[in-house]
Image (cartoon, rainbow, N blue to C red):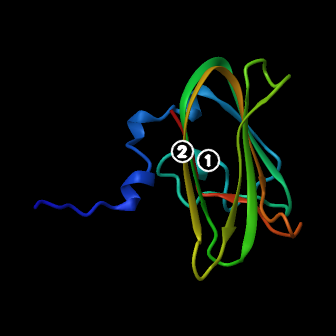
């Protein structure tokens, strides 16, 4: 009998950088707040470091604006929380008309625990045509308005 041990990490790991849209060339980004030590580029661009963190507590929005409509087939998100127990909710939605109307892709909650589940990685396979705006709304703790939102990585293909 032949057997092979498979790694869960390979299922959720981000593919090679060549597969992703070059957001620095294709999109403009709007954010509701930003910690100067953790800018949004750290989450959107490969190899840029420790991810994004909000400067202000509470619900935060990250919006990617595409001047030329994009076809989107995959949205990969990674969140990490190693210090605070919290229940986060995020909403991912898109627009084909410059943000006049939105369609929801997913709304999801995750319980972070420093002693256990301290990371969340989601790989959303989608077929979105003509995307002009992609929006991520993060409520860092649905039970506490004082938590800060963060995003380790966001990749789009």
- Closer-to-camera residue (120/64): 120
Q: Which residue lies at the image location 58% right of the left edge and 34% below the top edge? A: 24
Q: Is residue 109 found left or right of 22 in the rendered image?
A: right
Q: Is residue 22 found left or right of 53 in the rendered image?
A: left
- Measured as percent of width and height from the top left, residue 92 is found at 71, 41
Q: Is residue 67 above or below residue 121?
A: above
Q: Secondary structure at mark 2?
A: loop
Q: Which residue lies at the image location 20% right of the left edge and 61% below the top edge? A: 4
Q: Is residue 35 visible?
A: no
- Measured as percent of width and height from the top left, residue 10 is found at 36, 55
- Closer-to-camera residue (22/116): 116
Mark carried by residue 112: none
Q: Secondary structure at mark 1?
A: helix
Rate crowding at label 1 as few (under 14), some (14 to 19) or many (20 or more) other CA atoms within 10 Å.
Answer: some
- Measured as percent of width and height from the top left, residue 74 is found at 53, 35
Q: CA distance from mark 2 to mark 1?
A: 6 Å
Q: Which residue lies at the image location 66% right of the left edge and 78% below the top edge? A: 83
- Measured as percent of width and height from the top left, residue 22 is found at 52, 32
Residue that numbered label 1 is attached to: 41
Q: Is residue 50 above or below residue 84?
A: above
């Amino acid at each position: 009998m032949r057997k092979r041990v498979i790694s869960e990490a390979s299922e959720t790991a981000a593919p090679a950088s060549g597969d992703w849209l070059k957001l620095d060339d294709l999109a403009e980004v709007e954010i509701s707040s930003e910690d100067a030590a953790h800018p949004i580029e750290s989450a959107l661009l490969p190899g840029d470091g420790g991810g994004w963190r909000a400067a202000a507590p509470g619900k935060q929005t990250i919006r990617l604006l595409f001047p030329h409509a994009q076809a989107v087939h995959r949205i990969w998100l990674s969140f990490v929380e190693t210090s605070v127990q919290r229940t986060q909710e995020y909403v991912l939605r898109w627009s084909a008309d410059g943000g006049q109307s939105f369609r929801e892709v997913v709304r999801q909650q995750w319980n972070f625990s420093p002693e256990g589940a301290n990371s969340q990685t989601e790989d959303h396979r989608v077929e979105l045509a003509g995307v002009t705006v992609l929006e991520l709304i993060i409520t860092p703790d649905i039970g506490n308005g004082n938590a800060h939102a963060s995003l380790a990585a966001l990749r789009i293909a």
